[in-house]
Image (cartoon, rainbow, N blue to C red):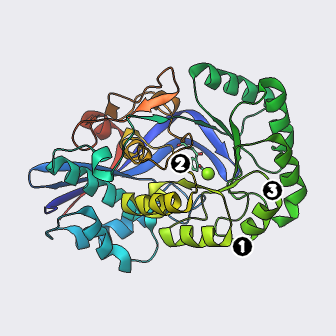
Amino acid sequence: MKVERVELRVVELPLVEPFETSFGREEVRPCILIKAQGDGLTGWGECVAGAGPWYSYETIETAWHVLKDFLIPLALGKAWDHPEEVSREWERVRGHPMAKAGLEAALWDLWARSRGISLKEALGGVKERVESGISLGIQPSVDDLLRKVERALEQGYRRIKVKIKPGWDVEVVKALRERFGEIPLMVDANAAYTLDDRPTLQALDAFGLMMIEQPFRYDDLVDHARLQRQLRTPVCLDESVKSPEDARQALKLGSCRIINIKPGRVGGPSAARAIHDLCVREGVPVWCGGMLETGIGRTHNVALASLPGFTLPNDLSASRRYYRQDLVEPPFELHDDGTLSVPSGPGLGVEVVEERVERATVRREVFP
Ligand code: OSB
Ligand code: MG
């Protein structure tokens, strides 16, 4: 195959409700969409870098720069047989996993379509449905959160994740346990704590949580290892694992017992699959995280989550939980059993509605 044309766009979609974490609050989700064309086919990818360097150092601007000036030139016009060959060319570009992941995803879609197979098949997925969990942001009050959780449980979500930060943690979890009993519950700190906060984390340890996600710094492995030795609750790493190599080191150090795999954070579908394979070998459960993706990124994530090692519920919720109108048809709907279907048509297996993409576009450039 050969990529002959790449189109980059920044799109902005209003969220159905603001999403607040320990690092900030989002009301509109901007992202870069990548459309790669070659051999008469089109592939789509989504780059999850945000407006500011809060979750990671990458932003829309840095990702646009790295895509435009380095990654796209290395991909255009070269013959290749598999997307991994192209992404290997990018290894000399240090860091910038979100920029790489968006373009690599488009190449996987293109490649799967060229073979007439679904992304699920292309990646080696086995599941027809993936388990859906919901990630609930920090709310104005505990009562607001209780209402949100009640609604999510009614809808059938298989696990509830709540964002925490100092001052919004033990009391919140206590209220949830009192109200809802032993529901599958976990917390995500987005790196808001330090070793000095161990009393708080020890207190959380008493609530039988499925896991505590990323309590410490976005780049820490050592303090997490120390914490994990002192907790019964599994630590799950998100921000700290930016590559298969980070995952290897984290497991070696005992920094976590679970990994949240986000293709965007780790450099793309190939790296995500490599971390999955490593975790399966090591007996470490994984699940697929999310970055409030539009239907394009979500479809890639759903296909990844169909791999056999994704044994825990994912941050893959129904389209309507994020956006009034998704960019793909059909949108993702939650089945009564709390799962989403994995599309089975060629490539993404859903239709990208270009007219909606066009309406949401605030910037566009075509290469060459
Ligand atoms: O830490 O998992 C996170 C969204 C944006 C940035 C970071 C995170 C999240 C989520 C939402 O938790 C997951 C989703 O897409 O449903
Ligand atoms: Mg997280």
Q: Earlier in the sequence, mark 1 or mark 3?
A: 1
Q: Residue 295: where, in percent of width, then height?
A: 38, 38
Indicate the quadrant where residue 67 lies.
bottom left
**Which of the two residues, 97 or 345, is positioned nearer the viewer here?**
345
Tag 1's secondary structure? helix
Residue 34: tell me if it is visible: no
The number of numbered badges drawn on the structure is: 3
For residue 70, above or below residue 63:
below
- Residue at left 28%, top 40%? 358
Q: Which residue is mark 3?
A: 231
Measure the C-alpha gap from mark 1 to mark 3: 15 Å
Q: Which residue is mark 1?
A: 222
Confirm or deny contact between disc 1 and disc 3 (CB under 8 A): no
Question: What label sits on residue 289 in the rendered view?
Answer: 2
Image quadrant in which you'd find residue 361: top left
Q: CA distance from mark 2 to mark 3?
A: 23 Å
Relative to residue 222, is residue 196 depicted above or below?
Answer: above
Instruction: Left or right? Give the position of 174 relative to 284.
Output: right
In front of the other: 367 or 84: 84
Q: Earlier in the sequence, mark 2 or mark 3?
A: 3
In the rendered image, residue 359, in percent from the top left (x then y), is placed at 32, 37
Q: Amino acid at mark 1?
A: Val
Name the residue nearer the viewer: 127 or 218: 127
Q: Is 69 left or right of 51, judged from the image as shown?
A: left
Q: Amino acid at mark 2?
A: Gly
The furthest residue to the right: 199
Q: Position of residue 337 (x, y in %)?
A: 51, 23
Q: Residue furthest bottom?
A: 92
Q: Is residue 152 above or below residue 289?
A: above
Q: Quadrant of the N terminus?
A: bottom left
* Classed neighbour count for the residue bearing mark 1: other residues with Cα under 10 Å, few (<14), some (14–19), many (≥20): some
Disc 2 Cβ-to-ligand 1 distance below 8 Å: yes
